[in-house]
Image (tube, grey):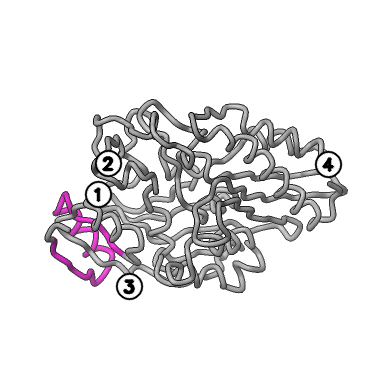
Amino acid sequence: MNPFTYVRAANSDEAIATLTREPQAMFIAGGTNILDLMKEGVHTPSQLVDIRKLPSTEIVTKDDGGIRIGATARNSDVAYNSIVQERYPVLSEAILAGASAQLRNMATVGGNLMQRTRCSYFHDTAFACNKRQPGSGCAALEGFNRMHAVLGTSEHCIAAHPSDMCVALVALDAVVQTHGPRGERSIPITDFHLLPGETPHLETVLEHGEIITAVDLPEIPLNRRSHYLKIRDRASYAFALVSAAVVLEIDEEVIRNARIALGGVGTKPWRSLEAEEVLVGAPATQETFTAAANAAMQEARPYRHNEFKIELAKRTIKEALKTVAAISGGQA
């Protein structure tokens, strides 16, 4: 691990100013991702700016009926929060499906939003990786790519996004609040992460020195129900082969509103507008769910070792939809 300096910021303005002055500096909160990357030589920051005490760990109800989650709230605190469990169960389920209890006790909401891919070629500096070193190539394209993405890929990168929490946030229409050198921003979660395209090293829209301050979730109607389903190689501490976050409103067995987000298959947390279009206005039936699952994966591009993900994703979507329809009183 390369030498670096460590500072603890007293407030958000100080943290932003410190990072802005130092091009190779990085924020650190829980550190569950960045410290591993530093040990592997992937990240070599000149300075770490500790923001664990900034800006907020609170989870509060907003005037508009939604909630605001502080960026430094621990994942475990969010998952077990009574408001989250009652009104946003898909978020609690997604967080508890990720990592281990020990890591969830350290990881923060902001850190989860910023975590980098677990692609083995990204983590191993002996291999070419455009995400780690732009222009060097992508070893995963011809390598062992079983865990890689089939949606949103490019010729420069096929790494899957690792987060469970972010998939649920996409299904909930979350908004990321930030503060940076140019002031405050409100960023819809669907715009926060970037597709690899020709610049896979750019993973979010954040500018250098910009800090996540909170995540806002909108008010959820009483008849809206949700579920997170994760398929993986083992029961715990494993990344998703496929996951689905489903949020539905069903009235008299007709789907009035739908949000579908996928994990494990996309280069970013994947919102499936195609599946939602099939669902809205249709009856909550097996036939509708099958059509939605097919629509969600119609643009998928498999690689040598991960073609199985397409059928697995379809089955995962259908099972998650059936679960939510049953909760809502619909007929599957």
**What residue is shown with label 2?**
132
Name the spot of residue 171 as percent of width and height, x first.
Answer: 59, 49
Asked if residue 307 lies in the magenta stretch, the reply is no
For the residues marked 2 and 1, what is the alpha-carbon distance in whole angstroms?
7 Å
In magenta, the rendered stretch is 4-28
Name the spot of residue 63 as percent of width and height, x first.
Answer: 57, 65
For the residues marked 1 and 4, what is the alpha-carbon distance in whole angstroms?
47 Å
Foreground pick, 128 / 117:
128
Foreground pick, 210 / 24:
24
Query: Hey, what amino acid is under mark 3?
Result: Lys
Pointer 1 local density, CA inside 10 Å: few below 14, some 14–19, many at least 20: some
For the residues marked 1 and 3, what is the alpha-carbon distance in whole angstroms?
26 Å
**What residue is shown with label 1?**
42
Q: Residue at x 38, y 26 (%)?
A: 155
Pointer 2 local density, CA inside 10 Å: few below 14, some 14–19, many at least 20: many
For the residues marked 2 and 3, what is the alpha-carbon distance in whole angstroms?
29 Å
**What residue is shown with label 4?**
285
305 left or right of 124 in image: right
Disc 4 is placed on an element classified as loop
